[in-house]
Amino acid sequence: MADKILRIGGASGFWGESAAAMPQFLGAGNLDYIVFDYLAEITMSIMARARARDPGLGYATDFVSAMLAPQLSEFAAQKVRIVSNAGGVNPVACAEAIRRLIDDAGLDLKVAVVTGDDLLSRADAFASQQSTEMFTAAPFPAPGTIASINAYLGAFPIARALDRGADIIVTGRVVDSAVTLGACIHEFGWRPEQLDELAGASLAGHILECTGQATGGNFTDWKLTADSMQDAGYPIAEIAENGEFTCTKPGGTGGIVSVGTVSEQLLYEIGDPQAYVLPDVVCDFSQVRLAQTGPDRVRVSGARGLPAPDSYKVSVTYADGYRGGQLLMFYGFDADQKARAYATAALKRAGARLEREHLAPFTETLVEVIGDESHFGEARKVAGSREVAVKVAAKHPDRKGIAVLLQEAIGIALSAPPGLTGFAGGRPRPSPVVRLYSFLLPKAEVSVSIEMNGETLDASDRSGVAFVASDIERPEAPQLALNETMSIVPLVQLAWGRSGDKGDNANIGIIARRREYLPWIWATLTEDVVAQRFAHFLEGPVERFLMPGPAAINFVLHDVLGGGGVASLRNDPQGKGYAQVLLDQPIPLPAPLLETL
């Protein structure tokens, strides 16, 4: 193993993240890079609307004002390099704002911009090709409804910009892990055929991209970090030339870095763990091994790579009407019955008004009574609850239709059952429904450029091969050592769990706390068992993937989020709590293993 270790800190996981990471990292010192991830599909649509209002907007403005401005001189003094996808749909404007900041500070820093992901100008051409959505086979959306079209670019353009001396790199849409992988390619001189190294550093980027989720946030064993949550440390990856890395955090910070926290982030928002497709490499995470090597230090190894695909994934966001709703509370006896009666009456009154005003009916309605026995099926059962929250929500093609619901949901309050209350500062407003459409586009049809010091360099990638998932060799199922004496324990005593979303699909990663528990978890948590657990939401199949390396199972639930993101009316449109629902599933365990709990 080579001696060189590259230290990269992950400072942002979404647009709106706290700026706490920069003082932590610069206070601790000894970092080579700080990387920032800001972009999700809904973020791109929000930025696109901002750019439509003002050509100078469309990027993460707080990256410039909150992350860079207060610390600019210090990270320049420490010679820390910055890589960020904060450019959104307007990376050129973001870079210009940074350059003004640098000039005002009298510093000598080079800013590079990676462009080429924005394909919005080709909307009519894509529509005329009559392509279909890669997951649902839906037709291409009407060009007039489209907010953004962006290809997910890779890491090699970032590496080339670093090769040319860039101190700060701003990109538009790149895959989340590319900001980390690009730094590694530059520092270690990796070539495209070094697949295992590329996969390992991509995994490091995947661990860093959600910041505090690798250091105790969203963790099953959350009580371990409850007292230090306010001072939670941000993650650092110490990456070696072979692509293996150690995850840690700045000393003296809160949170925890453990096999559990890092394993959960490993499985977060992945699909097939043997086919994690990125522009630069197809990753196989099924044999990844994690080891606690010291306090807040976890060693990660075993990622494997397959050749890069010959296409980019392209995501389109488009408008599909409006949605809105009202959240109120009922308390006292029969609270759940009162809440449902109120919600039913509000929808009936709003529906009658739509008819009187010659507006179309609602395209979808939803009533959720959170805290009663039926919400989220048996999984969230609260027997005898005397206090519930009720949400009444709907979708409509016209903003006016949602305005009617919001008015009538409050307007009926004085005719509602007793026990109605709430805490709010005004009536909610209708919001656009933004949907996601994804398709593959040959790399040869996307031109990528690097702009730096007034010079433009072509960085297009035309490499890759067609990826065939059916060629993957799957691991054998774990074997049970049968035992006549069995006891029933909840899954949470045997495993950690983490869940997330991809469009209208959700994934649930389950990681055995001890390797010997995995066969019993695998035998019990079948696709049918998980499907039944989420039957109240599930509209598609459940897939199950075995990961022998981390002793884990990844479930993918298709068509389970009511459209997902802002296209959904659900209380949890991104499946963030799904693992918590599954973790109380009863699991039979042989008597000898009970002694290890």
Image (cartoon, rainbow, N blue to C red):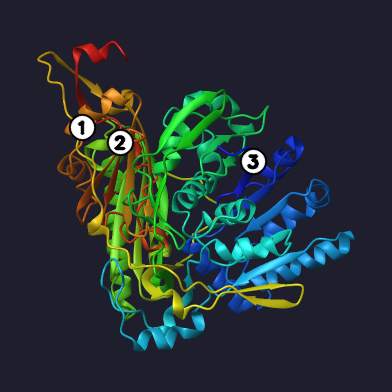
Question: Which quadrant is home to the N terminus?
Answer: top right
Q: CA distance from mark 3 to mark 2?
A: 30 Å
For residue 4, the mark is: 3
User: Which mark sits nearer the N-terminus, 3 or 1?
Assistant: 3
**How many C-alpha atoms fall within 10 Å of the one at disc 2: few (<14), some, or many (≥20)?**
some
**What secondary structure is found at the residue carrying circle 2?**
loop
**Quadrant in which residue 107 is drawn:** bottom right
Q: Nearer the viewer, residue 281 or 110?
A: 281
- Using the image, tell me which numbered label, if any, was put on residue 94: none
Taking the view exactly as shown, the residue that stands out farthest to the right is 106
- Asked if labels 1 and 3 touch by Cβ distance under 8 angstroms, the answer is no
Instruction: Tell whether label 2 touches label 1 (CB within 8 Å).
Output: yes
Q: Is 408 located above or below residue 29 in the figure?
A: below
Q: Which residue is mark 2?
A: 548
In the rendered image of this protein, does residue 406 appear above or below residue 482?
below
Q: Where residue 419 sits in the image (x, y, percent)?
A: 38, 40
What's the amino acid at mark 1? Pro
* Amino acid, disc 2: Pro
Q: Are marks 3 and 2 in contact (CB under 8 Å)?
A: no
Quarter-wise, where is residue 445 in the image?
bottom left
